[in-house]
Image (cartoon, rainbow, N blue to C red):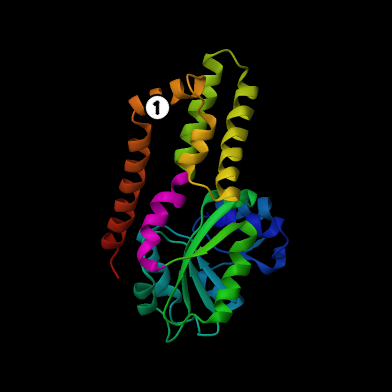
Amino acid sequence: MGRCMVKGLLETQTLKKTEVFFTTKHSDTASQVERDLGIKSCQSNLELVSKSDVVVIAVKPQNITEVLEEIGKKISKDQTLVSIVASIPTALMEKKLSKNVPVIRAMPNTPAFVGAGMTAWCAGSFVTESHFEKIQTLFKPLGKVARVDEKHLDAVTGLSGCGPAYIYVVLESLTDAGIKVGLPRELATQLAGQTVLGAARMLLDTGRHPAALKDEVTTPAGCTIDGLLELEEGKLRVTLIKAVVQATKRAKALAKQVKF
């Protein structure tokens, strides 16, 4: 996810390559990222903190305690800590940091890679209006941005954080279906992708309820209603709902497994 963010910020020219530093545990990964993105790796997290105005933590939840214990006393209130780590509340992170450090917890998703991401974020105790502008600058070039209450961040993780994976399953299924009924794979992939993209844009641009948009496609005794009947019998609707619910539960559980 960190790599998706950086690529999006570089491609939109929000940041220059000389303005971005990163660390990773593995030297071979660092070399690969340097080659792919043209940005400079730091030898340690402390070196990165010393060079940065905004520090983004993009690790697995089970690794965040270790990282915060290492850098917590080195980050000042004049810097901003942005966490895209699933599940971990701002209050827990603040306990590991120097006094009054502004903490922003965000949940972007991988379509940020192509500037079509969705980022929801919440503010910690010491975030001001200037930090709000900073987070807008950081995430808006990657797609859409929404500020939410922190109590909703786990649900955001289950829906938009994990959601691209659900849609890729739908896209794969639609593509395979097209091949099953005789379409070439390349054409089936294009049809599936553009159809999902167009449907999503209709939803966002019109602001209408998805059920109303669905009804407009569904003519009496037509093809669509037969397809919808199969989806209902296959329990696609309830399966997608359960996927979001289960992912949200997992996000809540992860926080309880991390020792602070």
Check the image and report above or below for 135 versus 156: below
- Measured as percent of width and height from the top left, residue 88 is found at 36, 65
Point 65% across, 23% down: residue: 187
| Residue matched to label 1 | 231
Q: x and y percent of residue 53 in the render? A: 60, 77
Question: Which segment did they paint magenta?
Answer: 149-163
Left or right: where 67 falls relative to 180 = left
Q: Is residue 60 left or right of residue 197?
A: left
| Residue displayed at 57% across by 39% down | 199
- Look at 63% across and 68% down and name the residue there: 137
Quarter of the image with the C terminus is bottom left
Up-down relation of residue 181 to residue 63 (above or below): above
Of 62 and 160, nearer the camera is: 160
Magenta stretch holds residue 161: yes
Amino acid of disc 1 = Leu
- The 10 Å Cα crowd at callout 1, few under 14, some 14 to 19, many 20 or more, is few
Task: Report the residue at 64% width, 52% height from top.
Answer: 115
Residue 40, above or below 80: above
Residue 140 appears left or right of 16 = left
* Relative depth, front residue between 85 and 46: 85
Q: Residue 259, can we see it?
A: yes
